[in-house]
Image (cartoon, grey):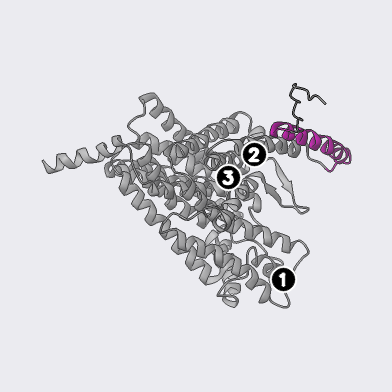
Amino acid sequence: MQLSSRPQAPRRSFTIDRYTLFAAAVIAGVLLAVPAITFLYVRGRLDPLLVLAGIVGVIVALRLFQVSERSNKGIVLLITAAGMLSFVSLPTGRESRIPISMLVALALVVPWLLSMLWGKPPARLKPSPINRPLIAFVAVSIISYFWSQIFRDPLLFVWSSFPVVQAAALVVNILLPLTLLYVANQVTEVRWLKYLVAVLLIFGVASVAFFFIDQRTGDLLFYRGTRGLFSMWVAAFAYGLALFHKGLKPWQRALLLLLVLIFVYRYFYVGRSWVSGWLPLGVACLVLTWIRSRRLFLLLGMIGLIYIAVNFDFYYEDIVLAEEAEGSGTERIELWVQNLTHVANHPLFGVGPAGYAPYYMTYHPHDARSTHNNYFDILAQTGVIGFTIFVVMMSSLLKVGRQTLRRYRGQRNFEETFAAVTLSAIAGAVIGMMLGDWVLPFAYNETIGGFDNAVLTWVMLGGMVALGLFKSTSSEDVATVITPLRKERT
């Protein structure tokens, strides 16, 4: 038998590339999801804005998955979501809703924490004075949650939704500090800090523009994200850039100072009754002025004192007397005393996240109001141990801020500006915490939706820690530091 000389064609194996599989999965997902979405919408159980946000979120998540430096871009996305996506949130079955910014923070922080256990190689924390007190505060918050379950008063009235609210409050109380730690360890270039500041200033301009032009639309887009210490951060960065950054052109400096004046007018004159809107702002700007120039500080201080003296009656009636009439003055002291009576019965780890609400409803049902003070909130929720650790953590942040500013002092660039602003903002935040729950939102006051405005402070302070951890500076920055030293020696 003669064999054919023609070679036989090899059998082709059936293969599918990754793109085809991905496209098929997307199409299948859409075909399965559309009937369910249509059914829920017809039944009135679906928020169209939530669907739109979900679609955008999936697209952004896929994009972040495909690009490098997704952690830094995720931080910018977090600030963006907190600033202008507060009108979209996830339902919980209760009155509280989960903000999109909180989901973004969870998506960033949780995988990073897991990578410390199972990463190859495992992630490690960068050395910083803030690490131990921050981790200790997170640990104490978790302990206080279980402590409050074990040592709860037997006569306490606990309603059906409280366990869900308490668990959500625990997540908020530990996620915000962990977000700071995440930013401090992930940001390694100054340009990402510039992106954060740029987004913040854009939101600042948009928020005041909508306030004066179309307040209803502004409230829809920016309301929750622009509460709390938002005004302080925008004005402080605008003012700090105008004061410290020598690379700015005169018209840029003028626009920044104009933005500061608009914010002062918006919060100190138009919204003067809301003290949390202008007092932290004023404190931060005064500290910035002190850092930049003692003479300028004295000049602005004298102008401010003269203005207050001339308009003393006007502001006294509109702020002090109005606060007293609304019960926000001396009645707050009564609320704090009431709070301390329960702290005395649970001194070590407090009554747990959001835990003093059931005690108020049980023992003070006719006067069950939150303290409107972050310090008393933290003391009640985490006890003396947690409160002490929190104070140590804030002191460590102040220490890191001073070290960071000392490193970049005299460079008159963005780095020095960022260091000076964040250090000054710590002083403003310390004051702001006395006026409300703007750093750790209380579940029954700001609700967990307060995460939108509170996360801004933690991200920016994380950026301050990251700036202090940068290992090298550019040759231009080094020259800026060395030149004055040579002049001093000569």
Tell me where the magenta segment starts and ends, as one range: 16-45
Residue 436 percent location from the top left of the image: 56, 55
State the image quarter where residue 74 is shown.
Answer: top right
The residue depicted at 66 percent of the width and 44 percent of the height is 100
Rate crowding at label 3 as few (under 14), some (14 to 19) or many (20 or more) other CA atoms within 10 Å: some
Task: Report the amino acid beneath label 1.
Answer: Thr
Identify the residue position indicated by label 3 in the image. 227
Q: Is residue 436 visible?
A: no
Residue pointed to by mark 2: 61
Residue at image point 60% right, 69% down? 144
Q: Quadrant of residue 250?
A: top left
Q: Label the magenta part by its dominant secondary structure.
A: helix
At a point 78% along the width and 23% down the height, the residue shown is 4
Identify the amino acid type marked 3.
Answer: Arg
Q: Position of residue 169 (x, y in %)?
A: 64, 59
- Amino acid type shown at disc 2: Ala
Tell which of 443 and 316 is nearer to you.
Answer: 443
6 w.r.t. 302: above or below: above
* Residue 133, placed above or below residue 425: below
Point out which mark residue 362 bears. 1
